[in-house]
Amino acid sequence: MPGSMQTDCSDSPLARVNPLAKVVGIVSFGLATLLWPDFMLGLALIVVLFALSALAGILPGFSKVMLGFGLPVTAMLLLIQGCFSPRNTVVIADLGFARLGLEGSLYAAKIVVTLMVFLGGFYLTGKTTYMGRLVAALTQVGIPSKVGYLVLATLNVVPQMQRRVKVIEEAQHARGLETRGGFLSRARAFIPLLGPVVLSSLTDSQERGMTLETRGFGIKGVRRTSYLKAGWGVSDTLVTVFFLAFLVLVLAACLMDRAGLLRLAIQWGGRA
């Protein structure tokens, strides 16, 4: 598959896990956080994701993404849900212009940790997985090759655009166009940069389509082979079973909580 993106940590233990097992992990962790009645499980899973990022050697980048997303979203949701949610009954702070409610704040925390678990899982998977290997794993389990190519092309859109923008920006800077400096200088350079980026992207898409067509990508009734193989080992089976068992246990615990047989949520004077 053309245009694959190399992983930043190909020698890490996470990089050796089958991509499909990682996808199962993302879904399991995300659904478990969503099902749990409060934000505590999600908070624990975020700590686990930070530990995994340290194991993979990408902790600085992971922390930057998680904090860069989590802090503003938390502030926004605390303002909206904490101050103006109709479910608020217990006031925990008087901000002057509004009162911060406990129930809305707990609900905002639940939303934030759920989003961050999904974000952290996808970031870890993207940084520890060679995208061509992911597509190979999808096609090996019976996913049509066109769907696999669509997944690969979608995942590569942002990295390709970033590389293209950088190349065009350096070329324009070499020709005397000011592309660095303050906000106004960058804003003035953005419009001349936009045209070449869009045109080169369209040209690249056309050339890629012609290349795939000449290589018989659309031929039906033939068995395709793949240059890459995504092997499935015993460790991948164990990892997948662990993720699925974790999700089943969380689901069972949540059902018992709904039935009144088990209390999961911490009582903060209210309930998330």
Image: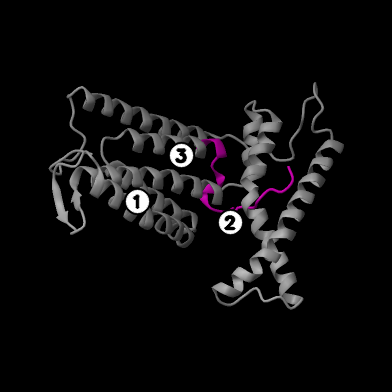
Q: Quadrant of residue 187?
A: bottom right
Question: How far across and down, in percent of the image, does residue 117 sit?
Answer: 40, 45
**Relative to 22, residue 250 above or below:** above
Question: How far across and down, in percent of the image, does residue 209 sit?
Answer: 79, 41
Report the residue at 58% width, 34% height from top.
232
- Relative placement, left or right, of 184 versus 248 is right
Q: Nearest to the eye among marks 3 and 2: give it.
A: 3
Q: Is residue 239 visible?
A: no
Question: Which is the main secondary structure of the residues drawn in magenta?
Answer: loop
Instruction: First in sequence, mark 1 or 2: give its number.
Output: 2
- Relative placement, left or right, of 98 versus 31 is left
Q: Amino acid at mark 1?
A: Val
Instruction: First in sequence, mark 1 or 3: give its number.
Output: 3
**Relative to 259, residue 243 above or below:** below
The one nearer the camera, 130 or 155, is 155
Q: Which residue is mark 1?
A: 47
Disc 3: CA contacts within 10 A as few (<14), some (14-19) or many (>=20): many
Question: How far across and down, in percent of the image, does residue 154 sit?
Answer: 63, 43
- Relative placement, left or right, of 102 versus 135 is left
Q: Which mark is residue 8?
A: 2
Q: Amino acid at mark 3?
A: Ile
